[in-house]
C-alpha cells in the first residue's frame, strides 16, 4: 500500500472516530406516543435573625403527568401536558425551547434549559445566554452545559448543567443563587429519560447608616427537583 | 386705586389659601401625632425592613420558581413552599403588639401618673355641672341619685380616656404581663433589634427609652397616683339609706359643691382636703373602697417653674 493511501485512511479513521463521539441532542417526540413522567419536588428553608434561627420541615410533593405527542409543525412538536391540574398545550422546539403555550397565556413561562444546535462531544462545555426578566429588570443569565458521558450502546447522554444568574442586589440586600443539575437524555428516542437538579437561594438583609452596618436577617431556601420517565407507549 | 386692588387681591388670596390649608392640615397632622410617642420610629423601622425583605423574597421567589422548572415538557404549576420566614413575621407581630402596649402604658403614666389630672377633676367636679338643669327641676331626685351620676360620669370619663380601672390600676403589672407574652428567645431578639436601632441611629433615643422602660417599669411600681383617679371615693349616701320624704340635705350635695367651686379657687384646695378626710372616714364605714385614698395627693400644687403643665389653670 502506498504511503499516501495510508495517510488518507488514517485521516478517514480519525474523522470517523470523532463522529462516533459526537452526539446530537434534539427532542424527537413521536406523534401518537404517550410519555409518562414522575415529577418530585422537595423544598426546605431556614431563617436566622441574630441568635434566633428557624428551620422549616422539608415539604415534598410528587405528581405524575403524561405527555401526549400530537404532531410536528413548523419546527415545533405539539404536545399536551396532562397533569392533575389540567391539560396544557405546548409547542416545544427540538432544542427544548418553548414556541408557545396557549393554555398558559398570561402566566410567566419558566426559564427553560435549551440545547445548543451543535454536535456535543464528551467533556465539551456549551453556553446558552438568555435574558431573565424580573419585573422591569432584565437579568443576564447563562445556562452552562457539559456532556459528561455518552453510553453508545444505550445511546444515553449524561449532561451536567448549571445556571449562572445574578439576582438584583443593593447596599442592604445581598443575594446568592445557584442551580445545578444532571440529565440523562435518550438520544435514540429523543426524549428526556431522567433529570435531577438542586437550587439554593440565600438572601441577607442588612442595614447601613453612615459607618455602621448591621446584618438583620438571613433567608436560605433550598429546592430539589427530579423528573423521571416511567413509561412510554404508542 | 384699581391697580392697588388688583395687587392686593393675589396677596390676600395667597394668605387666605395658606390659612385654609393650615387649618385643614392641622387635624391631619394631629391624627398622626401621638402623645409621648416612644415606639413609632422603632416600629416603623422594623416594619420597613420587613417590607423590604418581603418584597425581595416575593420577587426572587417568582424568579426561582421559574428557574426551577427547567424543562418545557413538565407542568409549570408551583409546589407548596416551605417558608421559615413565616415564624419571623409571627414573632414580629408579637413585638408590634408589645410595642403598642408599651406605648399606651407609657402615655398613661405620663399623662395621668402625676395625679394632677385626677386632682383637677376632683376639684372642679364637672359631673356636678352636668346635672345642673336637673337640680332646678327635681332637686330631691338629684340628691338621691348624685352618687350614681358621679359614678356614671366617672365610668364614661374613663371610657373616653381609654382607661380601664382594673387593668390600669397597676401599670407595672400590666407591663410585666405584656412582656411575659414573649418567650425568652423572642425577648432576646427584640433586645437585639433595639440595640441595632440604637447603633444605627445614635441620635435617636427611642429604642433606649423602650428598653429602659421595659427593664425598670417591670421591676418597680410607677404612676401610683393613677390609682386614686381610677378608683375615686363616692361619698354620698347610697339609695337604700335614704328616705325620700325626709331626705336630709346631702353632705356631698352637688349644688353645695358647685357653690364651693364658684366661691373661689383659693379656698377650694382647703375644702377639698377636708372633704377628702371626710371621704376617707365615710369610706371606712362603707368598706367598698377601703384603702384607696392612701396614695391620693391631697392638693393640686402649681408645677415647679420650667415644667410644662398640662392644664395651665394658673394662667
Image (spheres, rainbow, N blue to C red):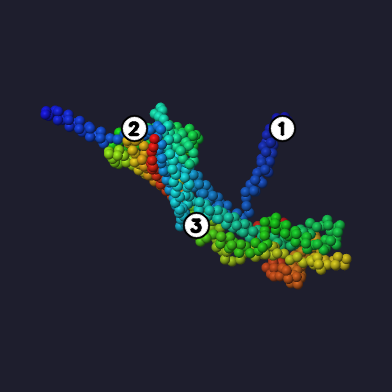
SS at mark 1 in the image: helix
Residue on which the image places disc 1: B5
Is B142 left, or right, of A34 in this rendering? Answer: right
Q: CA distance from mark 1 to mark 3?
A: 66 Å
Which chain letter matches label 1? B
Kindly identify the residue that appears in the image at 81 percent across and 62 percent down. Answer: B145
Q: Are marks 1 and 3 in contact (CB under 8 Å)?
A: no
Residue on which the image places disc 2: A117
Mark 1 crowdedness (10 Å alpha carbons): few <14, some 14-19, many ≥20: few
Among the two numbered marks 1 and 3 on one chain, the one whose residue lies closer to the N terminus: 1
Which chain letter matches label 2? A
Kindly identify the residue that appears in the image at 63 percent across and 54 percent down. Answer: B35
Could you say where residue B233 lies in the image, as x and y percent from the top left?
73, 66
Q: CA distance from mark 3 to mark 2?
A: 54 Å
Mark 3 crowdedness (10 Å alpha carbons): few <14, some 14-19, many ≥20: some
Is A135 left, or right, of A192 in this rendering? Answer: right
Quarter of the image holding residue B280? bottom right
Same chain, labels 3 and 2: no
Please, which residue is most extreme toward the front here? A234
Is A5 left, or right, of A154 in this rendering? Answer: left
Residue on which the image places disc 3: B189
SS at mark 3 in the image: helix
Is the N terminus of chain B in the top left, top right, bottom left or bottom right quadrant? top right
Quarter of the image holding residue A3? top left
Amino acid at each position: 500500500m502506498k504511503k499516501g493511501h495510508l495517510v488518507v485512511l488514517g485521516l478517514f479513521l480519525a474523522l470517523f472516530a470523532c463522529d462516533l463521539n459526537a452526539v446530537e441532542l434534539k427532542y424527537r417526540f413521536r406523534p401518537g406516543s404517550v410519555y409518562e413522567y414522575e415529577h418530585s419536588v422537595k423544598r426546605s428553608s431556614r431563617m436566622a435573625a441574630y441568635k434566633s434561627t428557624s428551620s422549616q420541615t422539608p415539604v415534598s410533593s410528587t405528581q405524575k403527568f403524561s405527555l401526549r405527542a400530537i404532531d410536528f409543525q413548523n419546527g415545533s412538536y405539539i404536545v399536551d401536558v396532562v397533569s392533575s391540574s389540567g391539560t396544557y398545550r405546548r409547542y416545544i422546539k427540538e432544542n427544548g425551547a418553548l414556541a408557545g403555550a396557549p393554555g398558559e397565556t398570561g402566566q410567566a413561562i419558566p426559564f427553560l434549559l435549551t440545547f445548543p444546535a451543535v454536535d456535543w462531544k464528551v467533556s465539551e462545555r456549551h453556553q446558552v445566554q438568555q435574558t431573565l426578566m424580573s419585573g422591569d429588570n432584565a437579568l443576564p443569565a447563562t445556562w452552562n452545559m457539559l456532556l459528561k458521558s455518552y453510553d453508545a450502546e444505550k445511546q444515553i447522554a449524561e449532561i451536567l448543567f448549571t445556571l449562572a444568574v445574578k439576582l438584583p442586589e443593593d447596599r442592604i440586600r445581598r443575594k446568592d443563587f445557584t442551580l445545578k443539575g444532571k440529565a440523562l437524555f435518550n438520544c435514540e428516542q429523543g426524549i428526556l429519560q431522567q433529570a435531577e437538579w438542586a437550587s439554593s437561594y440565600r438572601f441577607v438583609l442588612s442595614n447601613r447608616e453612615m459607618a455602621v452596618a448591621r446584618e438583620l436577617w438571613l433567608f436560605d431556601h433550598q429546592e430539589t427537583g427530579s423528573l423521571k420517565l416511567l413509561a412510554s407507549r404508542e | 386705586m384699581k391697580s392697588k386692588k388688583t395687587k392686593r387681591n393675589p396677596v390676600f388670596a395667597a394668605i387666605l389659601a395658606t390659612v385654609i390649608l393650615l387649618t385643614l392640615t392641622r387635624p391631619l397632622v394631629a391624627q398622626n401625632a401621638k402623645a409621648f410617642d416612644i415606639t413609632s420610629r422603632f416600629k416603623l423601622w422594623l416594619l420597613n425592613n420587613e417590607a423590604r425583605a418581603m418584597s425581595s423574597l416575593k420577587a426572587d421567589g417568582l424568579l426561582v420558581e421559574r428557574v426551577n422548572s427547567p424543562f418545557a415538557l413538565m407542568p409549570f404549576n408551583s409546589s407548596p413552599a416551605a417558608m421559615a420566614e413565616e415564624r419571623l413575621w409571627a414573632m414580629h407581630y408579637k413585638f408590634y403588639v408589645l410595642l403598642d402596649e408599651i406605648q399606651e402604658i407609657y402615655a398613661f403614666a405620663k399623662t395621668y401618673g402625676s395625679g394632677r389630672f385626677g386632682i383637677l377633676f376632683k376639684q372642679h367636679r364637672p359631673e356636678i355641672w352636668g346635672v345642673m338643669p336637673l337640680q332646678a327641676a327635681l332637686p330631691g331626685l338629684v340628691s338621691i341619685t348624685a352618687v350614681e351620676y358621679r359614678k356614671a360620669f366617672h365610668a364614661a370619663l374613663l371610657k373616653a380616656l381609654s382607661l380601664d380601672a382594673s387593668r390600669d390600676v397597676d401599670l407595672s403589672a400590666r407591663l410585666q404581663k405584656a412582656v411575659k407574652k414573649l418567650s425568652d428567645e423572642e425577648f432576646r431578639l427584640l433586645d437585639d433589634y433595639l440595640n441595632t436601632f440604637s447603633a444605627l441611629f445614635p441620635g435617636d433615643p427611642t429604642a433606649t427609652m423602650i428598653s429602659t422602660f421595659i427593664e425598670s417599669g417591670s421591676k418597680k411600681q410607677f404612676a401610683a397616683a393613677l390609682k386614686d383617679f381610677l378608683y375615686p371615693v363616692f361619698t354620698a349616701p347610697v339609695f337604700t339609706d335614704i328616705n325620700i320624704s325626709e331626705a336630709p340635705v346631702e353632705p356631698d350635695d352637688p349644688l353645695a359643691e358647685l357653690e364651693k367651686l364658684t366661691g373661689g379657687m383659693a379656698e377650694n384646695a382647703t375644702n377639698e382636703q377636708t372633704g377628702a378626710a371626710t371621704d376617707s372616714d365615710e369610706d371606712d364605714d362603707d368598706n367598698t373602697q377601703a384603702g384607696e385614698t392612701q396614695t391620693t395627693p391631697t392638693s393640686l400644687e402649681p408645677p415647679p417653674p420650667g415644667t410644662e403643665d398640662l392644664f395651665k389653670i394658673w394662667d
